[in-house]
Amino acid sequence: MARAALLAIGFIAALMGLVWMGQGSGYFPYPAVSPMINQSQWIWWGALLAACGVAAMAVSRRIS
């Protein structure tokens, strides 16, 4: 149960990080009124969140 939960949380975190990176770089300008669009600090926060998500997925694979 914990393995599946950690995998799901890691996947969602990685996906959300990619969205943040897309918004921060301007490649994903949705919603149009988002304060995150074209703000470079969100590229870094998104990369950090995506890396944490990937790490959580890797840890979930080691839990038996």
Image (tube, rainbow, N blue to C red):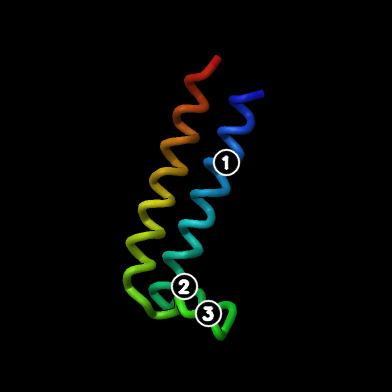
Circles 2, 3 touching at the beta carbon (< 8 Å): yes
What amino acid is labelled 1 in the image?
Ile
Q: Is residue 43 above or below residue 7?
A: below
Q: Position of residue 37 (x, y in %)?
A: 45, 79
Residue farthest to the right?
A: 1
* Sequence order check, earlier mark of 3 and 1: 1
Residue bearing mark 3: 34
Q: Residue at x 38, y 74 (%)?
A: 25
- In the picture, the disc for residue 62 is none
- Residue under the image location 59 percent in, 25 percent down: 3
Q: Amino acid at mark 3?
A: Ser
> Looking at the picture, which amino acid does disc 2 mark?
Gln
Which quarter of the image is occupied by the C terminus? top right
Res 39 → quadrant? bottom left
User: Are the residues at dot 1 and dot 2 in contact (C-beta closer than 8 Å)?
Assistant: no
Q: Which residue is mark 2?
A: 23
State the residue in front, 57 or 2.
2
The residue furthest top is 64
Question: What label does residue 9 carry, if any?
Answer: 1
Horizontal side of residue 20 vs 42, given as left or right: right
Seen in the picture, residue 15 relative to 4 is either above or below; the reply is below
Measured as percent of width and height from the top left, residue 54 is found at: 44, 41
